[in-house]
Amino acid sequence: MAHYYCLLLDMDGTLLDFEAAEHKAIQETLEHFELPSDHETEMLYVEINKELWAALEKGQIKRDKLVVERFARLLKKLERKGSAAEMSAYYLDRLGSHPDLIPGALEAMRELSEVATLAIASNGVAKVQASRLRDSGLEPYMDEVFVSEKMGVEKPNRRFFEQAIRTLGIEHRDRVLVVGDSLSADIKGGQNAGLATCWCNFHQQPEPEEEGNKPTHIIHNWQELYSIVMEEDELQNVGLKNRKHQF
């Protein structure tokens, strides 16, 4: 049996390349609404968006307000008039059409689904995540999808993870691994729930120095996760098909 037989996986920045999808979607949105589509304007949007998502994780803003507020603030910064709500709807539609994968993610999910229960654990917008998950080819390998918009609680709140574990019927918490790229949402959230964590440090960022903030595991590419999750006999079977896990 695998060292971890349940993986709670973040989507954006972990399985899917959110920066690539965001770049395409914001460019399409700016052009559609006849706004400047240069690098400076895009970076202005990215900065505003990151500030609002950080506030969301702290419980300082609601999701339905965030998705519109970011465009309201952008229009204000650009000193342009327009409908932030219309821009938000268009942007979310375009974002949902870009299921860019992190290199190695699809292959890793094929392999890991043979030895563990896989579930999405995302703070993203439910409609957008559903279409990207489907079109990316990842959906068949997921046993469940948990999106905060539908759950009524955001990562890093421990209730997000508690609800996911209950729904999956997992009895042994020490066999659950939270996998994600965000130290503040995924790793902190997993720690809040008393779960093992794996930080996807795909961009060679500095590792946390404080002992209490350190993830249980760190990977720099998806292949490194195999030896963390799988036992030796399972590692020897990587590449073989039809060996679905049994508990």
Image (cartoon, rainbow, N blue to C red):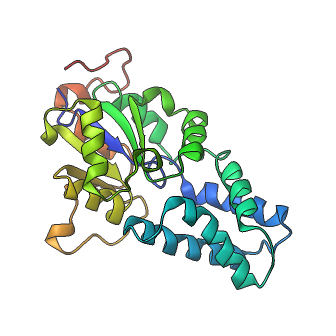
Toward which corner of the image does residue 150 lie, by quadrant?
top left
Please name the residue shown 39% across and 32% down the image: 144
Whether residue 57 sits left or right of residue 229 in the image: it is right
Q: Which quarter shows the N terminus?
A: top left
Q: Is residue 7 above or below residue 22?
A: above
Q: Residue at x 74, y 55 (%)?
A: 90
Relative vertical location of residue 225 with respect to residue 27 in this rendering, above or below: above
Extreme residue toward the right, this view: 34
Q: Image point 13% across, 41% down: which residue?
A: 174
Residue 19 occupies quadrant: bottom right
Percent x, y for residue 4?
20, 37
Quarter where residue 46 is shown: bottom right
Percent position (x, y) of residue 61?
47, 68
185 relative to 102 in the view: left or right:
left
Residue drawn 70% across the image and 55% down it? 89
Residue 72 spot, x, y in % from top left:
67, 74
Q: Is residue 76 visible?
A: yes
- Indicate whether 103 appears above or below 244: below
Residue 226 visible in the displayed image: no
